[in-house]
Image (cartoon, helix red, strand yellow):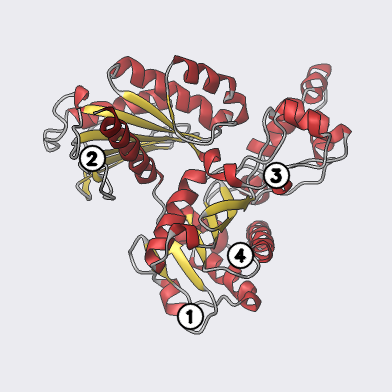
Amino acid sequence: MPSEGSSTSLILAINAGSSSVKASLYESGASVEQDVDPRQLAEIQIGSISAPPATLKYTRYAERVESKESTDNVDDQEKAFRFILNLFVNDKSLPELSHIKDIHYVCHRIVHGGEYGKVQVIDQSTYHRLEELSDLAPLHNTVGLTIVRAVHHEMPDATNMAYFDSAFHSTIPDHIRSYAIDPEKARRNGLRKYGFHGISYAFIVKATAQYLGKAVEDTNVIALHLGSGASACAIRSGKSLDTSYAETKGRQKNVAYFEQNGFDPSCRVAGSLVADCIEFNVPLHTRCWKAKSKQHEAAAHNGEQAEEILNKQSGFKALAGTSDFGKMSASSSPECKLAVDLFVDRVLGFVGSYYLKLGGRVDALVFAGGIGENVVTLRERVVDQAECLGFALDAGKNAAPENAVVADIGASTASHKTLVCQTDEQLEMARGCQKEANTTTYQSK
């Protein structure tokens, strides 16, 4: 185990999605006094788990590895994790990992942490609490805990650590995170704004601050994490001030409560499968779409059908018949045009709102995520509309951004910078894990 002043251990960072698992292996060698990132040794990503055959991407020492291992039997996230672990351990070209016990720490991305505001070591008590929170983000939390169980079985000596997307947003002020409903009922039921993509936003603000040569606590940005799940975040003094993706706790049981009180909190940037901002009475209508039998009516009554429609049968897929934003943006079909126009409009709404909330004191507008990093026309449309706020693009830089963690695509004459950030949630977790591990070890000496 690590020793005082210097440490060398392996960290496995796992990011489990609704249809994918990405795992990165890092070597930690920094002392507690140093601020050095852990070194990535290898990364494996398995995708399309729900639409087999699963895809495999493997990189070792930043070089692409062609693996002959078959993914035919990988049909869920637990099998994906075991496949990844086996591939890492049996890779003879990865000498740092000779045995599974060489991995001392495993960090997990858990989307919704409820009231948890910081990283948690996953012991029996923490695990049971996370189980209770699984209905908050069933597509992600449930599979995340499945992998936690698998890690405990395969690596009983490793320390499991949970990193929460919602934790970054624990700094949102009460007047922004609260809803205009009975305060006591809100507290009792956990009805407030939480926010997601927080691990990504933590990485983005640190990377942006470093690029600008500023301290994180002096950095103000409007960050856009745009992918199959999309959100916006106003970051003031390095901390979350407001965010768009903000589901409450206990979604199914609370749908009815919000409807009865004339208010619904479902306001977010549309994604591949999820709806965006909706009026309070929309869930009432979605309950009736398929209520053609008493059984359907019963399911609709308890909110399950509304949740299914708004979270799994909406978004790009419902509007355009595809969840591939690149295809939509390149298509001339009316359906695709509507989906793209809607997406741009919603993003602009949050950019304008957050610009005002930050009082115009904005260091940069930052694009990240699969869409934000890769779709040139999306960035162009958003920034062109935001020109009145002092943003402007350099067309050449936007068309071919520099291959760097942070790239400037803004015009030199603009009042505020426009950046593209290659966000890295696994690295952000590994950084935190390294810091926690080294600090704990140092303090115990």
> Are dots 1 and 2 in contact, CB under 8 Å?
no
Q: Position of residue 266 (x, y in %)?
A: 72, 43
Q: Position of residue 157 (x, y in %)?
A: 27, 18
Residue 184 visible in rendering: yes
Using the rendered view, name the quadrant where residue 354 is placed: bottom right
Residue at 76%, 21% in the rendered image:
299
- Residue on which disc 1 sits: 411
Residue at 45%, 58% in the rendered image:
216
Of pointers 3 and 1, the one earlier in the residue sequence = 3
Residue at 54%, 47% in the rendered image:
228
Tag nearer the camera, 3 or 4 = 3
Near-viewer residue (437 or 4)? 4
Q: Position of residue 254 (x, y in %)?
A: 76, 29
- Tell me the kind of residue under disc 3: Asp
- Tell me the kind of residue under disc 4: Ser
Q: Which mark is residue 58?
A: none
Residue sitting farthest toward the bottom: 413
- Per the model, the C-alpha gap separating discs 2 and 3 is 38 Å
Of pointers 4 and 2, the one earlier in the residue sequence = 2
Q: Which mark is residue 332?
A: 4
Q: Secondary structure at mark 4?
A: loop
Using the rendered view, name the quadrant where residue 280 is placed: top right
Of pointers 3 and 4, the one earlier in the residue sequence = 3
- Tell me the kind of residue under disc 2: Ser
Q: Is residue 135 left or right of residue 32?
A: right
- Residue on which disc 3 sits: 174
- Residue on which disc 2 sits: 28
User: Eyeballing the image, is 341 above or below 301?
Assistant: below
Of pointers 1 and 2, the one earlier in the residue sequence = 2
- Per the model, the C-alpha gap separating discs 3 and 4 is 44 Å
